[in-house]
Image (cartoon, rainbow, N blue to C red):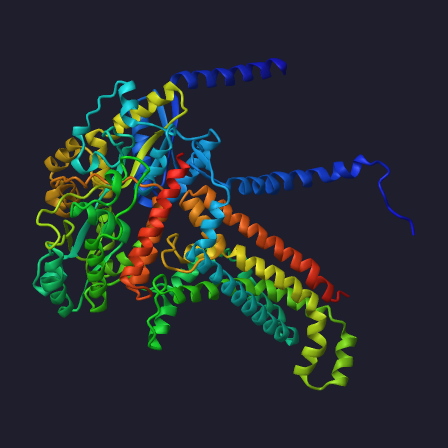
Amino acid sequence: MNLKNTLLANAVALGMATAATAQTEISWWHGMGGSLGETVNKIASDFNASQSDYKITPVFKGTYEETLTAGIAAFRAGEQPNIMQVFDAGAATVIGAKGAVLPVQDLLAANDVPFNIEDYIAGVRYFYADEDGKMIGMPFNSSTPILYYNTEALEKAGVTAPKTWEEFQSVTAPALKDAGYVALSQSHMPWIFTENFFSRHNLPFATNNNGYGGTDVTINADAPELKAHFEAFKSWIDNGYAGFFGAAWDDNAKPFESGEVAMWLGSSGSFGGLVQKADFDFSATVLPYWEGVTKEPKQTFIGGAALFAMAGKSDAENKATAEFFRFMTSPEVQYMWHKETGYVPITEAAYEMAKADGHYDRFPAAETGIQQLQLPAGDWTKGYRMGFYVQIRDVMNREYTRYLTGETSLDDAFGAIKSEADKLLERFAKTQG
Amino acid sequence: MKRAGFANYWLPILLLLPQLTIIAVFFYWPAFNAVQSSFYLQDPFGFGSQFVGFENYADLFASKEYAKVARFTLLFTLLVTATSLATALLLAVKADKVLRGARTYKTLLMWVYAVAPPVAGLMGVMLFDQNIGSVTDLFAWFGYDYRLGVNYWDTAFAMIIVSVWIQIPVNFIFFLSGLQSIPQHVREAAMIDNPSGFGRFWQITFPLLAPTAFFLLIINITYALFDTFGIIDTLVKNNPASNPMTLVYKVFVDGFRGNDMGGSSAQSVVLMVLVLALTIFQFRLLERRIHYT
């Protein structure tokens, strides 16, 4: 009896020891649900199958916000995962906390994984970088807002997708209205109509280099160009050119999917879902701009989320994380991710592979996001870095909705956004003190 | 009469220890932490932090939005409590009189109690949805353009209806058992004195139900303030924008979505004070006026 127990204990100990030396296990917390989550699991299991030294375990933690909050709580308890997915609006929180993450560029260099920021798609490079351009988070699910359109509806109305908002309001929208359609809906006002509005028109979004220069920032949320844009948007809603269904993403997407709305501003990452949901032919084009604001529209920057290597892990685990990043950024994995989900491939090599494979001959709309991210860059096109930004977006959504439903005036709405956002930025600066 | 007591001084403390430990770990410790962090602005990851004194509170009380949320919470609590208590009382009085098929009737009224708040919220989202909701269609038939998630009061309406619906069964069960515990001889005596059913109810039945009603009042206020979180979260789809929300949901939005530890701690301290006041009100004022048999 005793002998048996001892043998068993030895066997268990031995088993654990061999597992520990043979395989380094790392964890990956993410916020990708549904079919996206399945693709994430596939990337992880492909990585595990591709070699025997490391094993990665992906864990779904809920929405982006819930993932970030869970990661923060875990970090404070010393139980953080090796890799955490953080979304665009949470970037300042995680990058601002000096010592919470290992900059991905340093991590790769320390583990002999070649890295050259020029290998990445232009609009992808600097959003998750520091002011000097060092990449801190590895872009993962990268998307950018584009204009989807119902091909049949546009043909029926005898118009093509608008290049500018001037064209939209004078030609496209009236024709579509006559053909019995609501011309436009959009799914994310802070992202599509604010952040990327500034980038597309090459306007400064915030002081101190859009916030990359430090926490001493004020926001330019009451820019006259932006106010004019929302004034126009309200007039489109009022005379039936546009539909507004609140701040929830799906409420604005559904009328497009059901064919009532002819054009929809969504994410390039929505492509995979739309292919399944829409029973009509659709295509996509780049985000329209105001010719009255700029004659030279610029690129947009990425939304979505990035993967951050959390600090406080052993060298062996960091090595495993670096190897996973090497795998994840390989053209094959990026192309698979791009094809399955519609998120843009983050490297030029993966883009070339998708082109060579004829992916865009089959689905021209799938290329729109990447093309938009590769348009000429300007001084204000790399992104923004602002703390408490999730709350700032909440304030924008609140005031925009109030303005659009007639609860408040244009000046009051934008005045409130400006003053509340600046107050939040000031508070955030103090948390870093 | 013999007084029961412990011979050993330490035994009662030992017996109480598990309960005290739980209270200390799950209530006093977090409460202390909340009070402490409400005086700081701190980096979510715990790297930097700055003592700001009462600044978080000052910001809170200067905020027009916070005042708006507080006013909505008050209105919401009043409406949910009053409507769900009144409806449940009416149903209980009627159910009390049913002789045939009483069990089926009662079960039909009670099953809703088994629905979890987020599930109730989801059902609300389905019913009130802008694109596919049947309630929305009903409103459209009457010529009203109902917009859940866009119009402030339309969303508030859905929140109140769903919250009331889910709370009625609890109130119903308590009221019904309260009614059934009223002695038969009291009812018969009342029947002789007063032939009007309405008069009998307000003069005899209702005062005898008062302990139940008072207990339910407190339970319902607490429910409307705190337990409606799941319903609100599903109805605003985790993205409140200009929609109404309650104070508890605001703590979540700022603390868990926005990672503003100091600001949301100050809000939870405000809520703690509110609960404290409610408890004092319960024990000091109302308990004395209620006659328990």
- Looking at the rendered structure, the number of numbered marks drawn on it comes to 0
Quick one: quadrant of the C terminus of chain A? top left
Say if residue A175 shows up in the picture: yes
Indicate the position of residue A59 as horizontal and vertical percent values.
Answer: 39, 36
Image side of residue A318 versus residue B162, left or right: left
Q: In this rendering, is residue A117 above or below A110?
A: below
Quadrant into which the N terminus of chain A falls: top right
Q: Nearer the viewer, residue B191 or A6?
A: B191
The residue under the point 39% across, 43% down is: A427
Out of A167 and A354, give the one closest to the viewer.
A167
Residue located 40% across and 23% down the image? A313
Above or below, B238 relative to A238: above
**Residue B167 position by quadrant:** bottom right
Residue B187 horizontal/vertical position (percent)? 75, 77
Asked if residue A61 can be seen in this view, the reply is no
In this view, B163 is above or below B30? below
B228 above or below A356?
A: below
